[in-house]
Image (cartoon, rainbow, N blue to C red):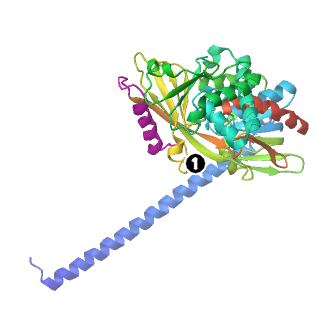
Amino acid sequence: MTLKRHEGFLLYIKITRYTVLAFLLTNHLTTRLITRFITRQTARSDGDKKMMIANLSIWEKESYYAPQDLVIVGAGLMGLWTALELKKHRPSLRITILERNTTPLGASTRNAGFACFGSPTELIHDADTLGPDAMLAVAEMRYKGIQKIRRHFTDEQIGFDACGGYECINRDYKNWALLPDKLHWLNSLLKEITGSKAIFQQIDHKLAAMGLQGFDALVENVTEAALHSGKLVQALTQKVQATGVNILYGIQVSGIEKQSASMQINTLQNQAFTAAHVLLCTNAFTSELAPEARIEPARGQVIVTSPIPGLPMKGTFHFDEGFYYWRNLGNRILLGGARNSAFEAEATTNLSGSDTVRLALEHFLTQHLHPSFQYTIEHHWSGVMGFTTDKRPYTALVREGVTAAIACNGMGVALTPVVAEQLSTGLLDYF
Ligand SMILES: Cc1cc2nc3c(=O)[nH]c(=O)nc-3n(C[C@H](O)[C@H](O)[C@H](O)COP(=O)(O)OP(=O)(O)OC[C@H]3O[C@@H](n4cnc5c(N)ncnc54)[C@H](O)[C@@H]3O)c2cc1C
């Protein structure tokens, strides 16, 4: 059978119309089904949430969720050291730490693990910008912080390695001509703190033997050390828990409200806590809870090489006023920094890292490691630091019932033990 042209056209219209109708009908049914599914799921999860609130057992109410003297938000180094310090002074204090991740996730377990109090060019820069007294005050806190860590833990517990530290410097450094004088000046200032007459010694002749190239000077600091950041946080967590502090992981604080006689801490898990006072140890993430706290996030990225057979370099190393830092990890190299290659982009709390910085780090290795070293990059990660404009940690009452202890400016391994000590004296007045 053959169709005339106009009959064929009519048939085509009919088929198209039915196809469109069928499509609309299917679409409508699909939409209804999806909507019904979502509604059911939402109702179910709302029900779950309500169940969580409505059905806490009396045992739970009187233990995990019992009213506290202090709720600390954030189980990084700052939260942990502060809890330990408070318990030392007042063992009866009821303290709960709420941590949003399954393990702390910010800077404390993502850093480079340097136990240092400052490289010469970093200290000179700080003295120039903040004044010698402010520079010395922070250096002293860092020095004391490292000593305190060592009083609390054995070297094995935290992977402490008294490996010594170095700074590589180039002729284009603005104080190059004055370097020997500046080192002498720093040594005389730091003698009071470290007890050592000449903490920084220039030993340029050792550069080549360490497998380094492309640097003009090397300054040694024999007191510097490295540690294992994961082991430190884990050991400290266990110590804090042993004092009776309750640490709950996977609880994200979403807001804090003042009630008549206490603070209510709301969470994304829809379970509220109450406490007489709240301490935010949320570092770079603090603006989500307390925008009034002055803090700038600064992402730091790290790469680690494959093992390099015969690596002659041992110790912690700094370059460019602290913008590049590396250390040996057995016979691997861990290198971090290069934030100054993309300052604005790195002012973020996003932990995914960026190719710009990763490539800058890889380029740094090819420039400064002896070309005979063969390696690949096996690990990379990023963490987020909190910065203030005056390089001092920020500890302040941000509003009634809420204190913040944040922003160790990329020096928190060494600073948090001492900041916690100073902070706890004031906090005890609230209880
Ligand atoms: C790459 C890198 C290298 C570094 N190298 C060194 C170094 O070599 N030496 C040194 O001294 N310092 C170093 N630092 C800095 C040091 O790690 C930090 O100063 C220190 O860890 C800060 O500890 P913190 O507890 O204040 O913050 P964090 O460790 O960031 O802890 C904050 C915690 O709060 C939690 N949190 C945030 N918001 C919420 C919420 N709403 N509810 C519940 N929990 C929440 C986070 O999950 C996180 O665990 C480095 C940092 C980085 C990123």
- Residue displayed at 60% across by 44% down: 298
Q: Position of residue 321 (x, y in %)?
A: 58, 36
Q: Examine the rendered structure and indicate whether residue 87 appears above or below residue 321.
A: above
Q: Residue at x 44, y 62 (%)?
A: 30
Q: Residue at x 74, y 17 (%)?
A: 151
Circle 1 sits in a helix, a strand or a loop, which is it? loop
Q: Which residue range is magenta in the image?
A: 352-375
Q: Which residue occupies the foreground of this view, 270 or 288? A: 288
Task: Give whichever of 380, 132 is nearer the camera.
Answer: 132
**Displayed-image quarter of ligand 1:** top right
Q: Which quarter of the rendering shows the C terminus? A: top right
From the image, tell me which residue sits under label 1: 348
- Residue ranking furthest to the left: 1
Q: Is residue 373 magenta?
A: yes
| Position of 230 relative to 431 (above/below) | above
**Is 151 left or right of 21, judged from the image as shown?**
right
Picture quadrant of residue 316: top right
Locate residue 390, reporting x and y percent: 71, 44
Residue 380 drawn in magenta: no
Q: Position of residue 268 (x, y in %)?
A: 67, 47
In the displayed structure, 1 sits above or below 140; it is: below
Residue 181 visible, this orientation: yes
Residue 182 sits in quarter: top right
Circle 1 residues within 10 Å: few <14, some 14–19, many ≥20? some
User: Could you tell whether 38 is left or right of 262 in the image?
Assistant: left
